[in-house]
């Protein structure tokens, strides 16, 4: 029952083998923003290209397969499932037709027009609009989740918070509490593994007791699920209270995220990979403006 620990979704994995770890965290955040924003109002071809680029980055990243293979397999399954459901949804509604012309003339016009129907079996019809909707939906889910997951796997929470604080630094002129916001974000990122650990412990307790949901019935199974959710929420609030007590013991002193950074950015050592990443990023933005419009 330790499958949650074997799938590090959204968790930092320490290591030095991947070239993704050497990229400036500010560039990583810019790349993720590119993957999140460029699919907006883009055609299906651009979204498919983003998926291919993400797969190439993942396969050539040098990361260990155990850090991304299972997560990317589950994400593929989720994306394809949602895409198939989206394909069978009706994409348009047809209003009542008015017989302003003779049926023979209408049949001739319909024969001359190209057919938009791709697949038809029984009550299910897949036309070009529904196929495009399914492709856009599945590729958007994969792009959003996997791009953020790759960044979180290869970037420590301290570096990520530092990069976000660097982008938000102009807000400090307006007396915006950047230190407080950065520290709270750092605590939230550090709190995610604790939530996963509590959820894993509850699942392990159910597996050890060999609970059979089919024999319990609907009401008993629902009551068990609600009790487990209540216990999970209680444990999470207990952890949060312990963290709050530790902060109160320090008189509410907020530590700057820069204090937690293990190493400074070596611009000379990583200048080549950072320069290449910046140029490729601008190239992707140019291609999106030039060819990616729907």
Image (cartoon, helix red, strand yellow):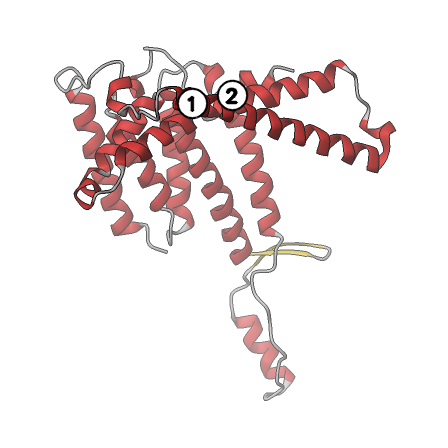
Which disc number belongs to residue 102? none
**Of 116 and 8, which appears nearest the observer?**
8
**Of 48 and 235, which appears nearest the observer?**
235
Residue at position x 20%, y 37% from top? 169
Residue at position x 19%, y 19% from top? 265
**CA distance for labels 2 and 1:** 8 Å
Assess disc 1: are there few (<14), some (14-19) or many (≥20) residues with their C-alpha within 10 Å of its C-alpha.
Answer: some
Q: Are marks 2 and 1 in contact (CB under 8 Å)?
A: yes
- Report the residue that reaches farthest toward the top: 16
Q: Quarter of the image holding residue 82? A: top right
Which image quarter holds the N terminus? top right
**Of 37 and 4, which appears nearest the observer?**
4
Q: Quarter of the image holding residue 264? A: top left
Would you say 155 lies left or right of 95 here? left
Q: Residue 102 in the image: state x and y as whole percent.
A: 62, 87
Would you say 133 lies left or right of 31 here? right
Query: Is 191 placed above or below 124 here?
Result: above
Would you say 22 lies left or right of 68 here? left
Question: Does the rendering let one see residue 72?
Answer: yes
Helix, strand or loop for disc 1 = helix
Query: Is 120 placed above or below 57 here?
Result: below
- Report the residue that reaches farthest toward the left: 268
Residue at position x 46%, y 15% from top? 65
Q: Residue 185 in the image: state x and y as whole percent.
A: 37, 31
State the residue position of label 2: 194
Query: Is 118 placed above or below 24 here?
Result: below
Residue at position x 16%, y 43% from top? 173
Which image quarter holds the C terminus? bottom left
**Of 148 and 175, which appears nearest the observer?**
175
Would you say 108 lies left or right of 273 here? right
Which disc number belongs to residue 190? 1
């Amino acid at each position: 029952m330790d499958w949650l620990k074997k799938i590090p979704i959204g968790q930092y994995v320490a290591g030095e083998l991947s070239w993704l770890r050497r990229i400036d965290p500010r560039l990583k955040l810019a790349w993720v923003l590119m993957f999140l924003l460029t699919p907006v109002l883009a055609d299906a071809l651009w979204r498919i290209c983003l998926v291919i680029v993400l797969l190439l980055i993942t396969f050539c990243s040098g990361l260990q397969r155990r850090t991304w293979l299972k997560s990317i397999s589950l994400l593929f399954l989720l994306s394809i499932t949602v895409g198939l459901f989206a394909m069978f949804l009706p994409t348009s509604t047809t209003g009542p037709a008015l017989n302003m012309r003779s049926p023979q003339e209408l049949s001739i016009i319909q024969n001359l027009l190209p057919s938009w129907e791709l697949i038809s079996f029984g009550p299910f019809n897949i036309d070009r609009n529904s196929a495009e909707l399914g492709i856009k939906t599945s590729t958007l889910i994969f792009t959003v989740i996997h791009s953020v997951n790759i960044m979180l796997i290869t970037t420590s929470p301290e570096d990520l918070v530092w990069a976000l604080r660097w982008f938000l630094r102009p807000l400090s002129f307006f007396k915006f509490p950047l230190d407080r916001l950065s520290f709270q974000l750092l605590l939230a990122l550090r709190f995610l593994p604790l939530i996963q650990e509590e959820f894993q412990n509850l699942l392990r307790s159910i597996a050890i007791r060999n609970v059979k949901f089919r024999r319990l019935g609907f009401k008993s199974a629902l009551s068990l699920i609600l009790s487990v959710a209540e216990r999970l929420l209680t444990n999470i609030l207990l952890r949060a209270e312990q963290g709050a007590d530790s902060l109160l013991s320090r008189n509410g002193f907020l530590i700057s995220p820069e204090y937690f950074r293990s190493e400074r950015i070596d611009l000379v050592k990583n200048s080549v990979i950072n320069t290449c990443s910046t140029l490729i990023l601008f190239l992707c933005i140019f291609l999106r403006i030039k060819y990616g419009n729907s």
